[in-house]
């Protein structure tokens, strides 16, 4: 006997809206969405590049350590830097596409679509607030390291290269949460106009 899962949104109808429209026609007409698509492509390429570079770096370290018996000490600095960039760029992509792990508990508890949309809007607002708060402290930390002129031990690279992964990540996540909030407010207004 198999049990089929039905997402709660399917029971009451769609209540979720994405900030970036999937309609290619709209994206072609709007300069903003064309520029955003280019930004998303740059982010994706940078994420894949940093992830693949990390993999190649690890493989090279294994060969150098066990095959050549001459390990590369800089891996202790490069691996975390590449991992941080890959992680924060991935966070940006997940925020843009709204690919976060989410449940349907709100749709199970309430059947009123407008209430569900208001709760989701409040959730997006809370996420934006958290991202802004974490971004503030990330920027403060990055500027502190920048002012000190701190460098890594082995590679002698400026420490802000690591720190700015967080700053870029939080800024762009905040940008996409702002777009999400705008889309949710518009959807909420359109729903109320259709009801009247």
Image (cartoon, rainbow, N blue to C red):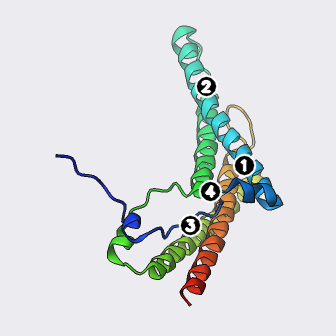
Q: How far across and down, in percent of the image, does residue 158 sit?
A: 75, 43
- From this view, report whether residue 68 is shown above or below residue 14: above
Say which of marks 3 and 4 sits in front. Answer: 3
Closest to the observer, 72 or 177: 177
Say which of marks 1 and 2 sits in front. Answer: 2
Question: Callout 1 environment at 10 Å: few (<14), some (14 to 19), or many (20+)?
Answer: many
Closest to the observer, 102 or 51: 102
Say which of marks 3 and 1 sits in front. Answer: 3
- For residue 96, the mark is 4
Instruction: Give the mark nearest the N terminus, 3 or 2.
Output: 3
Mark 1 lies on residue: 160
Q: How far across and down, in percent of the image, does residue 125 sit?
A: 57, 74
Closest to the observer, 135 or 154: 135
Say which of marks 4 and 1 sits in front. Answer: 4
Mark 3 lies on residue: 17
Task: Identify the secondary structure beneath mark 1.
Answer: helix
Closest to the observer, 108 or 77: 108
Question: Callout 4 environment at 10 Å: few (<14), some (14 to 19), or many (20+)?
Answer: many
Q: How far across and down, in percent of the image, does residue 89 sit?
A: 63, 48
Instruction: For the residues labelled 4 and 2, say whether their Cβ atoms are less than 8 Å apart.
Output: no
Quadrant in the picture for residue 101:
bottom left
- From this view, report whether residue 71 is shown above or below residue 10: above
Distance between mark 3 and mark 4 Cα atoms:
12 Å
Residue at image point 66% right, 73% down: 182
Distance between mark 4 and mark 1 Cα atoms:
25 Å
Task: Identify the secondary structure beneath mark 4.
Answer: helix
- For residue 57, the mark is 2
Instruction: For the residues labelled 3 and 1, say whether their Cβ atoms are less than 8 Å apart.
Output: no
């Amino acid at each position: 006997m198999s049990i089929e899962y039905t997402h709660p949104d399917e029971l009451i109808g769609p209540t979720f809206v994405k900030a970036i429209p999937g309609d290619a026609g709209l994206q072609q007409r709007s300069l903003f969405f064309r520029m955003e698509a280019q930004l998303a492509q740059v982010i994706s390429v940078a994420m894949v590049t940093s992830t693949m570079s990390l993999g190649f770096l690890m493989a090279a370290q294994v060969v150098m350590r066990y095959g050549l018996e001459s390990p590369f000490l800089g891996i202790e600095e490069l691996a975390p830097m590449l991992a941080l960039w890959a992680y924060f760029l991935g966070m940006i992509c997940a925020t843009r596409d709204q690919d976060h792990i989410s449940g349907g508990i709100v749709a199970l508890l309430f059947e009123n679509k407008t209430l569900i949309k208001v709760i989701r809007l409040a959730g997006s607002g809370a996420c934006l607030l958290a991202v802004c708060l974490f971004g503030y402290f990330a920027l403060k930390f990055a500027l502190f390291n920048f002012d000190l002129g701190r460098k890594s031990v082995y590679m002698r690279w400026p420490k802000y290269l690591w720190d700015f992964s967080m700053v870029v990540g939080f800024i762009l996540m905040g940008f996409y949460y702002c777009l999400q909030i705008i889309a949710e407010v518009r959807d909420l207004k359109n729903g109320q106009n259709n009801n009247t």
